[in-house]
Image (cartoon, rainbow, N blue to C red):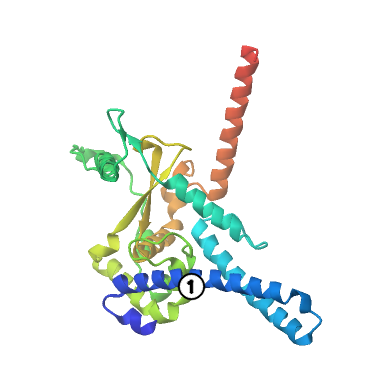
Amino acid sequence: MGERWKSPTLLECLPKRAFRMEKNNVRNAALQIKAIKNRLKDILDFTRDPVVAEEKRSLLAELNILWKEEEIFWRQRSRVQYLKGGDKNSNFFHTSTILRSHRNKVLKLLDDMNIWMTHHDDLQNHCVSFYRNLFQKRDMVVDPDLFRSIPCVVSDEMNQALCQPIEVEDIRKAVFELGAGKSPGPDGFPGLFYRNYWGTIGAQLEEVKDFFSLNAMPEEWNDTHLVLTPKIQHPERVSQFRPISCCNFRYKVISKIMTTRLNQWIPSLVSNLQATFTGEELSRITSSLFMRLCITLRLDRKGKSGK
């Protein structure tokens, strides 16, 4: 692992090797589970023999380990975040993975002329064109006097705190606070990889400090996978999908460090009424109140109509 990390072709070689290893391990684990179950059936009638009883205990212990590994694998693949602990749930996780794959697969879309597109290239070009037009830079004139009327709220103390040099501990803290199982970006490495091998690869992430000191980063760090997830049950148009960015992990570390430093000053810079900056608990409460309001209005409407 250590030697492979030092290789100049790390990003190209290591993820591919890991993928092949994963496929082999999953296949071998399934065969081992089947073989152990068959052996347990064979010795079921010989449990009074002490030698066979010891073999049975050994097989059951090995089977539990394989089941646990299988459960972890499918839990990671299923992207289920709300289930914590509990009994073996491989079938549940496996089903979740299949359903999620079917739900997120885009097989056809309506274009701007309300004509169905089913060819992969047509779907791809249509999605790219939609978001390119949506996010492209537009020519606009900004009155320079506009900003003169806006008071400056960033003090010298804030600037000094925000511009403090980045230390290795800042990077390590960001790595361990980021989600371990979040979908990786083009580099292919989730947060769990960096956590588990921090002693080996932690020094490589010191490159992050150069971004803050030189105001520049390698172009490939900014590469991003854009994934479309459906907003509704059966989407028909590209506008009914939500784009999600799967960034490279170094980019996430930079964002996390900046967010951590800004957090202490956000209350004095942004109004607490800004919905985007409300805490997670408050957001849930707001969503719950909104749903109750919708239900109440719906019931009132039915009552007035006599239904």
Percent position (x, y) of residue 282? 56, 45
Quick one: label 1, few (<14), some, or many (20+) residues within 10 Å? Answer: some
The mark total stands at 1
Q: Is any atom of residue 148 visible in this view?
A: no
**Residue 10 appears in the picture as rendered:** yes
- Residue 176: x percent and y percent? 48, 69
Q: Residue furthest right?
A: 48
Say above or below: 254 vs 95.
Answer: below
Vertical placement of residue 158 versus 199, above or below: above
The one nearer the camera, 163 or 180, is: 180
Q: x and y percent of residue 139 in the render? A: 18, 38
What is the quadrant of residue 162 in the picture? bottom left
Residue 93 is situated, as x and y percent measured from the top left of the image, at 56, 57
Q: Residue at x 59, y 23 (%)?
A: 298
Nearest the eye: 122 or 229: 122
Q: In which quarter of the image is residue 42?
A: bottom right
Residue carrying label 1: 25
- Callout 1 secondary element: helix
Q: Residue furthest bottom?
A: 51
Q: In which quarter of the image is the N terminus?
A: bottom left
